[in-house]
Image (spheres, helix red, strand yellow):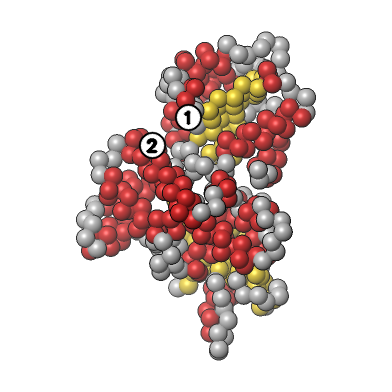
């Protein structure tokens, strides 16, 4: 079992705080395993089994729990008065009016509550209103490259590991599946579950085939500037007629269940957020390979996707940077201010034109915030007038 130490440390830091811990993320990214790791930590710290109430609402033994009252009664019957109780409820989105149950457990003085879900609606509507200021969200992703590498301690060929990482998937359980055919079936199963259970069943979309076609289109266009009208026009011209409002609904659904991430644009010189020209990135590149195969794989955009997810893991707020007529791949805003990232698979060519092109947007930014160029080129860290060129794998392994 891979230790998801960053997430585990976050849970430990919030232990016994008067906050509901809400762990969100795409299905099979490791939320349930994280709860198991944390429960092991609690036991090692002296917490007895009877003080831990753990329910996974997708397991058959809890299939009859469908309403908040049933869930509350199940948990409250097991709470021991005058003892500190740790309550874990996995995939809570199955329960109707769940906010009533969570609030009832939250107000109990001896209860520390942890919940997980695979859809952002967990933190929308009544639950967000009711629990405003009383919860902390822990956003979970599939394995980082550093976590993936930790599963192969004897292998120091990081280029090969990276190739496996993007093609074989960053979903933790995918590491346990040796045969490529079986792994593709597993990833296809995750995709089908998300589409059928988290999107179609919840939003009542009538055309599942259109939704799957749209998803494949978005997987094939990671890192490209997209507007809803442009997406509708391109798909319609390719023989899949789709309305703009349907595109908007599909995008909302795919981002709500964490299979896609949307990133907006920011005008660096004008210091304003722009309303058009978003980009979308996928939660796992292996899922993309499972659906699209290896055809026309844009390694530059794939690396860009991996860097985006890593910045997200490291807690940055991320935007695309518009600099005049050029573009910086990512503006990353953290606790210490802004950082700028340009990503290119390689900048090595005969006349240096590629390097100059990739550096130009960073050079056009007048401030003195850190600027980085990440590539797969095996060159030592180099400074181009203060812009640090770093091997992307070295950066991912920090």
Q: Which residue is mark 1?
A: 58
Q: In the visual, does 241 lie left or right of 38?
A: left
Task: Say above or below: 272 vs 190.
Answer: below
Residue occupying image coordinates x 47% and y 50%: 182
The quadrant in which the N terminus is found is top right
Q: Residues within 10 Å of mark 2 (few under 14, many from 20)?
A: few
Q: Which residue is mark 2?
A: 197
Residue occupying image coordinates x 25% and y 44%: 207
The image shows residue 293 at horizontal and vertical percentages of 41, 61
Q: Quadrant of residue 201?
A: top left
Q: Residues within 10 Å of mark 1 (few under 14, many from 20)?
A: some
Name the N-terminal-most of marks 2 and 1. Answer: 1
- Look at the numbered discs 2 and 1 and tell me whether their residues touch, using CB distance below 8 Å: no
**Label 1 SS:** loop
In the orientation shown, which residue stands out farthest toward the bottom?
A: 351
Residue 272 in view, yes or no:
no
Q: In the visual, does 203 lie left or right of 139?
A: left
Task: Say above or below: 53 vs 259.
Answer: above
Residue occupying image coordinates x 31% and y 59%: 231
The image shows residue 208 at horizontal and vertical percentages of 28, 44
Q: In the visual, does 230 lie left or right of 273?
A: left
Q: Quadrant of residue 66?
A: top left
The answer to which of 32 and 333 lies nearer the viewer is 32
Q: In the visual, does 372 lie left or right of 229?
A: right
The image shows residue 117 at horizontal and vertical percentages of 50, 35
The answer to which of 4 and 136 lies nearer the viewer is 4
């Amino acid at each position: 079992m891979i230790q998801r130490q960053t997430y585990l440390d976050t849970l430990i830091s919030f232990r016994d705080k008067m906050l509901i811990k809400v762990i969100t993320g795409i299905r099979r990214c490791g939320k349930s395993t994280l709860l198991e790791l944390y429960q092991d930590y609690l036991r090692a710290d002296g917490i007895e089994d009877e003080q831990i109430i753990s329910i996974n609402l997708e397991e058959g033994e809890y299939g009859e729990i469908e309403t908040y009252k049933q869930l509350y009664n199940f948990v409250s019957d097991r709470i021991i008065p005058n003892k500190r109780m740790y309550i874990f409820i996995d995939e809570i989105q199955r329960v109707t009016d769940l906010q009533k149950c969570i609030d009832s457990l939250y107000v109990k003085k001896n209860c520390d509550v942890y919940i997980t879900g695979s859809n952002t609606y967990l933190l929308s509507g009544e639950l967000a209103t009711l629990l405003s200021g009383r919860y902390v969200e822990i956003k979970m992703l599939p394995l980082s490259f550093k976590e993936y590498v930790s599963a192969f301690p004897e292998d120091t060929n990081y280029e090969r590991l990276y190739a496996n990482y993007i093609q074989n998937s960053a979903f933790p359980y995918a590491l346990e599946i040796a045969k490529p055919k079986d792994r593709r079936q597993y990833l296809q199963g995750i995709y089908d579950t998300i589409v059928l259970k988290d999107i179609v069943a919840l939003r009542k979309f009538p055309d599942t085939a259109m939704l799957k076609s749209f998803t494949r289109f978005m997987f094939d266009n990671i890192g490209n500037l997209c507007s809803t009208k442009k997406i509708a026009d391109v798909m319609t011209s390719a023989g899949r007629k789709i309305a703009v409002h349907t595109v908007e609904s599909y995008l909302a659904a795919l981002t709500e269940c964490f299979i896609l991430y949307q990133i907006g644009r920011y005008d660096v010189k004008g210091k304003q957020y722009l309303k058009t020209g978003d980009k979308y990135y996928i939660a796992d590149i292996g899922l993309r390979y499972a659906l699209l195969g290896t055809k026309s794989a844009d390694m530059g955009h794939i690396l860009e996707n991996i860097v985006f997810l890593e910045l997200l893991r490291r807690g940055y707020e991320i935007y695309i940077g518009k600099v005049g007529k050029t573009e910086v791949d990512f503006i990353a805003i953290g606790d210490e201010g802004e950082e700028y990232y340009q990503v290119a698979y390689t900048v090595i060519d005969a006349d240096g034109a590629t390097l100059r092109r990739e550096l130009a947007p960073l050079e056009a930014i007048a401030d003195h915030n850190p600027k980085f160029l990440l590539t797969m080129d095996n060159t030592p860290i180099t400074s181009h007038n203060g812009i640090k060129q770093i091997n992307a794998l070295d950066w991912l392994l920090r």
